[in-house]
Amino acid sequence: MRFMRFEQQGQIGLAVDAGEGWRGRFVDEGDVLTDVSAIAASDELARKALVQHLREGFVVDADQVRCLPPSANPGKIICLGLNYRDHAREFDSPPPAYPTLFARFASSLIGHAQPLVRPRVSDKFDYEGELVLILGRGGKHIAQEDALDHVFGYSVFNDGSIRDYQLRTSQWTVGKNFDGTGAFGPWVVTADELPPGATGLTLETRLNGEVMQHASTSDMIFGVAQTLAIISEGMTLDAGDVIVMGTPSGVGYGRKPPVYMKPGDVCEVSIERIATLRNTVVQEA
Ligand code: MG
């Protein structure tokens, strides 16, 4: 099953594709939950009722509506850095023994087909194609062997990075949180439709049609289950939280000469069996 959050003529809606195409409703129509994190966090009965309600809604043309980030304001957006060996090497880093974790905030998110924003203050705007998951169940001290039962679904993310700001200090927060840099979507595919932990899927990033990143999600150093076990050693994870799983090699920073995104560029991130996330770069006014 797939879930999408969208805007049409100024109204925000949710849509589901349960195998017969997209059907949805606007979120101000009574009991419809507001975003995919809220759906993920609802109990099974409520979720079933919602799915039925959406399936009885209007036909949604995914190419005509404006896709929004599936989660509007998740409690946490936790990202992994350096989670593929070849990518760690691009940054002259050894493969980490513990995941490099950093936070993103919802203010940096955009949806599919919304503009990636190259900021006024930097021309070092880089792409990072990534797998992202939404939790359906939270917990503390989640056991690795049970961790995949906590995942609601998976989507595609472009962890757009302002490299000079990212690397000014050892803390990446600013360089990873410029407005309009975190592309997320277009939709969420429920975990039951994908291999456990979304492993073995081809991830590809293309810039203006040229393949820049090509890897398998099986190449992640810390897989989904191990990541959830490690993070929840310290903090309670909540249903609806978003975890962004890191990028493979081929980023612009690691190229000689470096390749950065410019206004007018089109960046696409595809993950097999999930979706293609496509965004055009614009310059901040
Ligand atoms: Mg990243």
Image (spheres, rainbow, N blue to C red):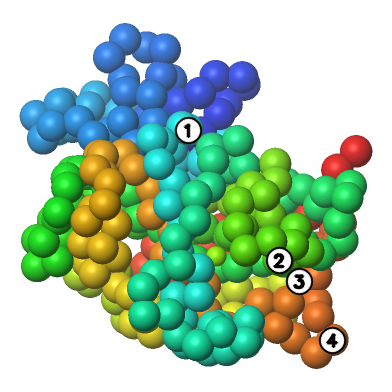
Q: Nearer the viewer, mark 4 or mark 3?
A: 4
Residue 164 horizontal side relative to residue 14, left or right? right
Count residues near mark 2 (Cα–Cα under 10 Å), then give few for <14, some for 14-19, many for 20+. few
Label 3: which residue?
208
The earlier-in-sequence mark between 4 and 2 is: 2
277 lies above or below 247: above
Count residues near mark 4 (Cα–Cα under 10 Å), then give few for <14, some for 14-19, many for 20+. few
Label 1: which residue?
72
Q: Are marks 1 and 2 in contact (CB under 8 Å)?
A: no
The earlier-in-sequence mark between 4 and 3 is: 3
Count residues near mark 1 (Cα–Cα under 10 Å), then give few for <14, some for 14-19, many for 20+. some
Please name the amino acid that badge 3 sits on: Asn
Report, in whole angstroms, how far the alpha carbon at label 2 lies from the one at label 3: 26 Å
Please name the amino acid that badge 2 sits on: Leu
The image quadrant that residue 65 belongs to is: top right
Label 4: which residue?
257
Label 2: which residue?
167
Report, in whole angstroms, how far the alpha carbon at label 4 lies from the one at label 1: 37 Å
